[in-house]
Each structure stands twice: as C-alpha cells, then as structure tokens.
Image (tube, grey):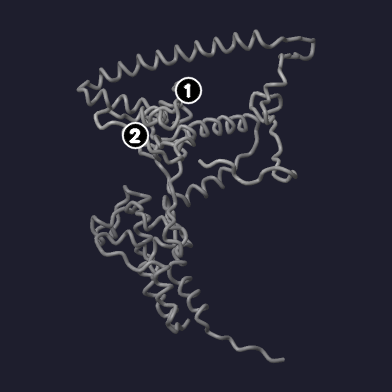
Amino acid sequence: MSTTPHLKTRQRAQMFRWLHGPGNVFRHPLPNSTNYLNAYDKSGGLIRTRGAKPRGETYSEAQNKDSGDDLEIDDIIEEEADLDTETQSTRRRVQRAANPDRKSKDAEELGPKDVGLPKEEAEDLMPFPMNRQFRSQPVLSEELKEEIHRRVMVEGQDVRTVSATLHVEMRRVAAVVRLKALEGEWVKQGKPLATPFAKAVLGMLPQTPYVPSNPVTHESINDLHVHSATTLQMFHPTSESRHFTRTDAGHVFDRNLLPAEKRIPHPELVEIQQWYNEGLQREDVTELQRKKNEKEEKVQREKERVRAEKEKLLVKKAETPRWEFRFRDISVESVGKDGRDRRGVGARYGMPHEDRKKGRVKIPTRVG
C-alpha cells in the first residue's frame, strides 16, 4: 500500500503563516475591540498601537503580495520567536488598558504614547479582508439601551425628545423600548435569557457608548425619505422676479406635499436653530420649546378624544357574561373599484396578488 508523500504546498505555508502570525493573537482576543483581521499586520501586531508609525501591511495585502512567492513551512516556524515579541507587546498593552491603575515596568519602557489602546480607525472595522468597501457599523451599547428605556418608561419622555437628545433614530428608540419591555416580562416569568451570547456578539461589534455629559451621535436622525411624487422629472416655468421657495416646489409635485423642513422626522430642530439665529438665548429657546410641546400635546389629546367619541358612536357593543361583541355598520362600496381599498372589510388580513391570473395586465401602466 503506497502513500502520497506530504507536500509543503503554498496553501499550507500560508495557513501556517496565519496561525503563527495574526491567528496567534486571536487565542486571547482584545477586550473592548472588534478583533478583525485587518486590524493586524502579517506579523500579528496590532497596527493601531504603533502610534505615529505608518500603517503596515494588512493581512489581505500580505496575502496578495505573498501569492507569487514560494513559502516554506520551516521558514515560517523559525520566525515564531520574532512573532512572539510583537504578540507579547500587544498583550502588555491590553493588560494596561484593562488595568489603567496598575503600574508596571512595561509602561516606562514603551513610553506615554503606548499606554492604553488607541481608538479603532476605519481600517480596523473591516471584518472581511477581501472586501475593503464594507465597514462594520456601530450598535447600541447596553448602557445606552438602558438609558433609552429609562427615559421613556420611567421619566415619561416622548420618543421624539429622546431621539433628538441621544442622537438615535426614532424607530430604533421605539424598538429598544419594546424589546426592553419584553425582556422584563421574560425575567418576571423566569424564562432564560441568552445573555452570554449577547455579550459575545456585542464584543465583536463596534458600540456606541453612553456618555451622560456629551451623548455620542449614533446615526443620522433627520434623513429625508424620497416621496413617490418627487420621482418624476418636471419643468415648471416661473418668472425670475418671483420668490420660489421649497413650499412652492413641493406644490409643483403635489398640492399636499410639504416642504423638506416639515417632512423630516425632527422639524423642531430646524425651528430651534432659527431661534438661535435670531439671537435668542438658551433659556428663551427652552421656554419657547416647552410652550410648543405643551400646545402640541393639547392638540394631540383633543384628537384622541374626538376619535374615541367617534368610535363610540359607530361601534355598538353587546356584552355577555363571558364575551363582548362589537358591531359596526359597513358598506360594500368601501372596498373601492379594484376591491383593494384599505377601508374595505378584511384589508388588514391582506389580499393575494393577481399576477398569475389570466387576462391581467402584467406590465407597468404608469411611470414614476
């Protein structure tokens, strides 16, 4: 029985280079760091700890560079002693970052620039070495989630105010509140939580911390979504002497289309900035905003009262010892000409598409 001799192929050499290089440092991941491949050079050293030195080759660059070289496993193993020096230096920096009060001789040897870990750069947030266009986006830290839930549920702040204060989009704020409430219910019911898994995932992603004195911007909160009426190209003639505003531009596309400063999620921020531009002080702006919020809350309560009264008149209730039946008058005309109007009966349950039915027009009939 013959056996094929062990061949020292280039792929095996590259594998052992990675195991004795960047792969060696992943046995002890850095705390509070993403630990992505591109954060290390081909020798296993953390690139961002080099201070003012130029960035060395990343793993992806080194892999492309070494693709045409004949590598030997024995040569890689001989370099292990040099790699251990860089790895030990990185571990010393990690220990100082985790224990800032601890004084060691290493801090004196490396100097003040090497104390602690520098902040991750854009090059350190590439989880896929071969895809240099992708960057990991930060996620909310647990402290920030707890603060969002506390402000909404305990202090009673509205979602819009919390979003503007903590620089988190309103839909994300609402999602955090709902998930935290669900988590609290699970804790009361004694259901197990996947806390170790959540900590492990958060440890591999960049996070937005909670800084009480100066909240960190997590994302843009005033993005303007494209309205379907603005997707058409239009040419509207007007005189040069006319003062054509954004309100007029919106009415060209649709008579009910509001200008951009009123369609954004936080139009109050534009008004606050206008007050500052008029020379008002911070105390005056705060008072004006408080009065405006009280007026809006009063209008909202009035709308809810009118809606509840209308609902009470339209719905007839029949109570039994066990159930409460509700009856509402409907009209068959409310489904519209195509039978898909949202005011029709059963609209909430959906209606199947008619793409596969015979005789149906399956090509677009309008543009925009």
Query: Exactly how many numbered labels are in the figure?
Result: 2
Name the residue: 29% across, 60% down: 106
Q: Say left or right for 150 vs 103.
A: right
Q: Viewed as shown, does residue 93 lie left or right of 182?
A: left
Q: CA–CA distance between discs 2 and 1?
A: 54 Å
Question: What residue is pinned by disc 2?
Answer: 237
Q: Which mark is residue 366?
A: none
The front one of 274 and 131 is 274
Q: Please, is residue 256 above or below residue 194 in the view?
A: above
Residue at left offset 48%, top offset 71%: 19
Quadrant for the N terminus in the image: bottom right
Identify the residue position indicated by label 1 in the image: 154
Tag 1 secondary structure? helix
x and y, in percent, of residue 108 in the image: 24, 58
Q: Residue furthest bottom?
A: 2
Q: Residue at x 47, y 33 (%)?
A: 146
Give the image location of residue 162, x and y in percent.
42, 28
The secondary structure type at the circle numbered 2 is loop
Q: Position of residue 168 (x, y in %)?
A: 42, 35
Q: Position of residue 91 (x, y in %)?
A: 38, 60
Could one spot residue 143 in this view of the protein? no
Q: Amino acid at mark 2?
A: Pro
Name the foreground residue: 330 vs 188.
330
- Image-based side of 233 in relation to 303, left or right: left
Which quadrant holds residue 58? bottom left
Of the image marks 2 and 1, the number of the one nearer the N terminus: 1
Give, as a three-letter code, the residue at label 1: Val
Of residue 317 and residue 113, the one placed in the foreground of this image is 317
Placement of 39 over or under 351, stated as above or below? below
Residue at image position (49%, 24%) is 153
